[in-house]
Amino acid sequence: MEKRSKIAVCVDMLGEGFDLPDLKIAALHDKQRSEAVTFQFVGRFTRTRNDLGDATVIANITGTDIKDSLRALYAEDADWNRVLSVVGANRTEKERRREEVFSGFSEVPEHFPLETLTPRMSTVVYKTTCATWQPHAVEDLFKAGSIVEGPHINETERIAIFVKRDEDRLRWTSTKEPTNVEYNLYMIHWDDDQGLLYINSSRLKDLHEDIAKKICGLDVERIRGEHIFRVLDGFRRMVLMNLGLSETQRKPVRYSSFMGSDIGEQLDTLPGNRNRMKTNLFGQGYTDDGKTTIGCSVKGKIWSYDSTNNFGDWIDWCQSLGRKLTDSTITTDKIIQRLVRPKRQTSRPEKPAIAIAWPETFLHLQEDKVDIEVEGVRSPFYDCDIELTSFSATGPLGFRIVADERVAKFEMTIDASGAHYRQISGHDVLVHFRGKEKFLKDKFVEDPPHIYFADGDMLVDHDLFVLPPYEDRPAFDLDKIEPVNWMGVNIRRESLTSMDDDSIQAFMARRLRDSDAEYEVIYNDDGSGEIADLVAMRLSGNTLKVDLFHLKYSSSDHQGARVDDLYAVCGQAQKCIRWRERPDIFLDHLQKREAKARRGSRASRYLVGSPANVNGWVNRWKELSYEFGVTVVQPGYVKTDFNPSHLEIFASTEALLMDTWGMKFRVVVAERS
């Protein structure tokens, strides 16, 4: 290369086999998703040459769509010499478990590499009495040549896998040829401690009794019947999406399937009804690991929508099911009683609504994939909000869309024909997503917003999801209400202009800055589309601790115990679960809002810390665990003046946050002045 060329631009060229020591400065515009490609590229610039300096790599550190093993490489201020020498050493516990299980197999699959397998979480469970298992015996069960891979066995974890070629006759002809040919993955785990055998297969219609007997003996017993519904134990806010019932008496229709609000009516008639029995159900709820799905049938099948590339996850999932299935203290009637029941409405529920949330489809998209157009101006989703305009217990449910400073008002009504959405002010609001444009009021018909009520119930379109009564749930703990002296603070002024002003937000920001929590970041997210008014974060070991503070100005100059002062701030708190559910979107939101502030020559949103903190966490977000807490702040409310009915609002807010993601809830109010 002649010296008159100082910059080389290439696309997928400088890889293995290319060597030019003159190259010393690399600029990576797009992150490679493969560590091998990245290391090969960087290696082109690290060749030794005495008359040139050390290699330098400049990389784009924004974004999240990269392989986990490269996140440390792209973290802010990463020491590449150290990272490259220990790449893989800082794997998460799940990654280590995954590789331990993979490496424990006696042979490596030839045609279907373990790293490419993503089985669905499902199983049939058998009780066993054998002292040892015989996984290789499956080879004697099928005709020669039908098992095309395996069986491969990890004796330490007691897991076996194989791939089988299955042929089925065509359903639409009586001829024997041709046939449908499919390849099915089989995964088997024997838990000798519990004496249980778990069999998973992509051939979903089979119960695999022949496999169970071949591996663990003729006396195996499939777990089925009423006991199978014990797997629902431990789920919180469980909502059934499908329910199958059969008639125990001889009738023309022996089996019925129910969905949506029809499920609630059927559940109410089940206790004590000997003429009907549950055959299968499927639902969604929360466990200590977050939101998940579970389905089961009286035949013994158990399944989830979740899939995994980590066989260790599947083993752990199976063993957790086994502990429930063998626990005789779990009663299925009690589980059914605690299910959330959807009930069809023919008019709006006559009780105060305290929050409205965007349709769920929006919440699972990256925020730059959705735009809201108000008054002819498109705004990114991270700058938009949906808010109630009234906390009234009667009349149409009023709400508004806020995009920057532009506002459009809507209302929702319910009658016998369903829910109806109408825009009552401004030009028609449009939503742009996935390359399509649609009137927002029409989008609400197919994907409705969620409306939260003060008692904890939730309305989705014209279905009210009613929480079951929890006799053992304690009342809200008064010790979680912290009275504060607000002297010198204008309790009617919510937002800060500087850290030293007399606003509620500035007072709380100073308080957080000077607290013992030692927050690395205190972020001002005030404005439409906010996560919270203040977001405070610190990294503790491998856990990112996030505290969200929702502030609301007093509706009066005089402090008291006005319930309207609580509705808005508790409603904001209830909407927080979306951020814990998707920490990648949460961190990306902070980045985008700060970038927009800088582009507009506005003050940084970082009151403590800098973008470097969040950038580093973004690049490690899958490696981190998360603890979220929520605090509502209302300086117009006096603790000693509280009304017992107000504690129900706090209790329902705390229950939602804890039941879903274990988010601790606190309240900051005023002490008697």
Image (cartoon, rainbow, N blue to C red):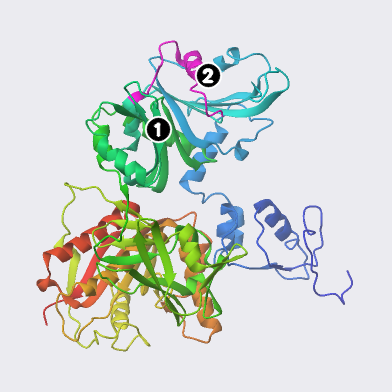
- Which comes sooner in the sequence, label 1 or label 2? 2
Q: Which residue is mark 2?
A: 135
Badge number at residue 475: none
| Mark 1, other Cα within 10 Å: few <14 / some 14–19 / many ≥20 | few
Q: Position of 348 compared to 179: left or right?
A: left
Quick one: SS at disc 1? Answer: strand
* Residue plotted at (48% across, 41% down): 305
Most extreme residue toward the right is 2
**Structural distance between the alpha carbons of marks 1 and 2:** 39 Å
Vertically, is 128 above or below 27?
above
> Can you give x and y, in whole percent of width and height, for residue 262 in the image?
35, 43
The C terminus: image quadrant: bottom left
Q: Nearer the viewer, residue 261 or 225?
A: 261
> Can you give x and y, in whole percent of width and height, for residue 182 in the image?
65, 28
* Residue plotted at (17% across, 66% down): 646
Residue 475, quarter of the rendered image: bottom left
Quick one: SS at disc 2? Answer: helix
Q: Nearer the viewer, residue 67 or 459?
A: 459
Q: Which of labels 1 and 2 is toward the front?
A: 1
In the image, is residue 128 part of the stretch drawn in magenta? no
> Can you give x and y, in whole percent of width and height, for residue 7 in the image?
80, 73
Residue 631, quarter of the rendered image: bottom left
The amino acid beneath tag 2 is Pro
In the image, is residue 223 part of the stretch drawn in magenta? yes
Is residue 540 in view from this perspective?
A: no
The amino acid beneath tag 1 is Ser
Q: Which residue is mark 1?
A: 256
> Can you give x and y, in whole percent of width and height, for residue 217 in the image?
45, 12
Is residue 179 in view from this perspective?
A: yes
The magenta region covers: 203-225
